[in-house]
Amino acid sequence: MFKKLPIMLLTLTMVLVLAACGSNGGTTSGSGAGGDTGSTGETGSSELSGSILAVGSTALQPLVEQVSQKFMADSKYANVSVQVQGGGSGTGLTQVSEGQANIGNSDVFAEEKLDADKAAELKDHQVAVVAMAAVANPGANVKDLKKQQLVDIFTGKVTNWKEVGGADQKIVVINRPSSSGTRATFEKYALGEKTEDPAGSIQQDSSGTVKKLIAETPGAIGYLALSYLDDSVAPLSYDGVEPTVENVEAGKYPIWAYEHMYTKGEPDAATKAFLDYMLSEDVQQSDVTELGYIPMSGMQVQRDAEGKVSQK
Amino acid sequence: MEHSKVTPREAQRRRLPLEKHRLEDWIGRIYTSICVVFLIAVIVSIVYFVTSKGVATFAVNGVSLTEFFFGTHWAPDAAEPSFGALPAISGSFMVTLLAALLASPLSIAAALFMTEIVPTFGKRILQPAIELLSGIPSVVYGFIGLTLIVPFLRDNVGGQGIGVGAGALVLSIMILPTITSVAADALASLPRGLREASYALGATRWQTIYRVVLPTVLPALLTGIVLGMARAFGEALAVQMVIGNAPYIPTSLLESASTLTSVITLGMGNTAMGSIQNNALWSMALVLMLMTFVFILIIRLLERRNRI
């Protein structure tokens, strides 16, 4: 019996090697298969099938994941499987642009990350709005900051809270990594300029850690999505406008961004069904609001890639 | 005497298993060769991939080597991007050396206690317990650091709590088991005669340890320390959680700083493949990889000395 062991091992290795090669080819053919389901969808067959891979923004990931579970549980879409992966906005945009993923989730417009010609190939589907607020440690004793004061704090010009009318406490800036989508949004719409980290500032990637640090560190300031706000931290008004969902929807409070789901060109039938499902009133009013995003339908203003705001 | 008379039939019967064994031998040889070729292919392709990506920053994007290695300004996303990686490189070395300084005396003393002072208890209970430490995932260390060490430093030492000091503390705990187990193994493998000769000459236990045992196992102890440093240098998650990640060379131990690994983990998901920001991260990965090679080289050299 044992004499056959080497042969078995050899076969096993060959199978493994072949499998490894096979899965490599599988990713490329996967998008091809997605294309095929597109044609069956167009012929009017009610049975959608295919697999969708959505990759990218970790800020958007929980929403897409939750909605994909609901989507797959729906008997209408029983043959469609949706896979959601994180990796960050940059990863999502790169992978959808290269055809490795069907959907690229992103916190920022593709134009801000990719070359213009690559970004032009992508089709933008805005599925939700996420708003954020500048947040301070409650001990700082500040309720409202003007835009210029925020800029001065985040560029390190102002280093003590008493300079902006707060307690006599050293300011500790808690930032996001310079390439993060959250930071890009905050810099673009709250500060109006790209900032460099002042010396001694802290960079953290996850909202949970940022919140924990702001709540614990005396004199800390950072920024968080509205869904993360609670009593342990003090949200700051921006130019006198409180960070609330109503103010964002009315276009009074400017620190918000769309959550994008990009496809390369027009989506195939299965992907389109998923995106439509995402934007359906049912999902927008339940999952989107539940997870702290603002539904698209509520927005009374819209904004383009250059940041121009217009009434809807 | 039976051997002298073998019928041709008998010879045939004996040769058959031999052929069979030859075949087995051959299959085994092919199988192991395939595995080794596969392994080498993996190593070569990883080294090639990281190198080609890392070199692109300089070759394709035109960042100068001096700027990368000696520039102190890291702002890859600014309007005028600059790619000075010195803060990250120096941060990596700083936390690694500090962690080794903190952990080495502790681990060597622990290893001495386990092997010289209470050998049976040490081997049965202490060593497995310390090895358990190495099985704890790094994210748990980081989380503990963020929840216990950072507030402790903030309240008792001052500053933000987060910073180089917190990073070095977390790392030193992480590399304790590495250094301890290498040191304990080296001490245990020391010939018994060496110690007995020393005792026979009238040396006390302390004199034996200090004058005989430690000098003899020194290369092995250094190997353990370098192994620990290699682990500390490459550790990303735990450090990233407690070090603060500001791209500056810190002026005090309580100030936020960044390491090569923390810059890579924070930036990799948010940068697009092929962009200069992404390539710069690959260059950092290349530096990390080359440093790991250096560590391995040092360990090899120490081992060679150890053998003599």
Image: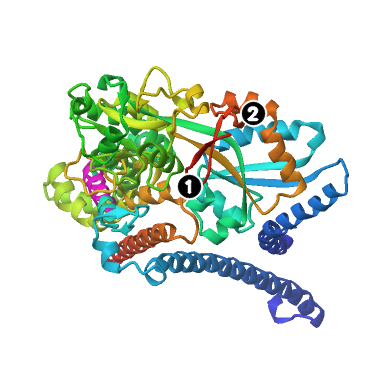
Q: Magenta segment, principal secondary structure?
A: helix
Q: Within the image, what quadrant is residue A312 found in? A: top right
Type of amino acid under label 1:
Glu
Residue A25 appears at what percent x and percent y?
69, 61
Above/below status of B168 relative to B85: above
**Residue holding disc 2:** A284
Above/below status of B142 relative to A13: above
Residue closest to the far front:
A311
For mark 2, does the 10 Å Cα neighbourhood hold few (<14), some (14 to 19), or many (20 or more) residues? many
Q: Is residue B100 magenta?
A: yes
Q: Chain of mark 1?
A: A
Question: Nearer the viewer's eye, disc 2 or disc 1?
Answer: 1
Q: Chain of mark 2?
A: A
Residue closest to the far left:
B202
Type of amino acid under label 2:
Gln
Residue A41 appears at what percent x and percent y?
83, 47
Q: Within the image, what quadrant is residue A200 found in? A: top left
* Pointers 2 and 1 in contact (C-beta within 8 Å): no
Residue A294 appears at what percent x and percent y?
55, 28
Residue B201 appears at what percent x and percent y?
12, 50
**Residue holding disc 1:** A306
Alpha carbon of mark 2 to alpha carbon of mark 1: how far? 26 Å
> Under tag 2, what secondary structure?
helix
The stretch of residues the image draws in magenta is: B92-106
User: Left or right of A151: which side holds B136?
Assistant: right
Q: Is residue B203 visible?
A: yes
The disc placed on residue B11 is none
Tag 2 and tag 1 share a subunit: yes
Q: Is residue B114 visible?
A: no
Q: Is residue A277 magenta?
A: no
Q: Which comes before the other along the chain, label 2 or label 1?
A: 2
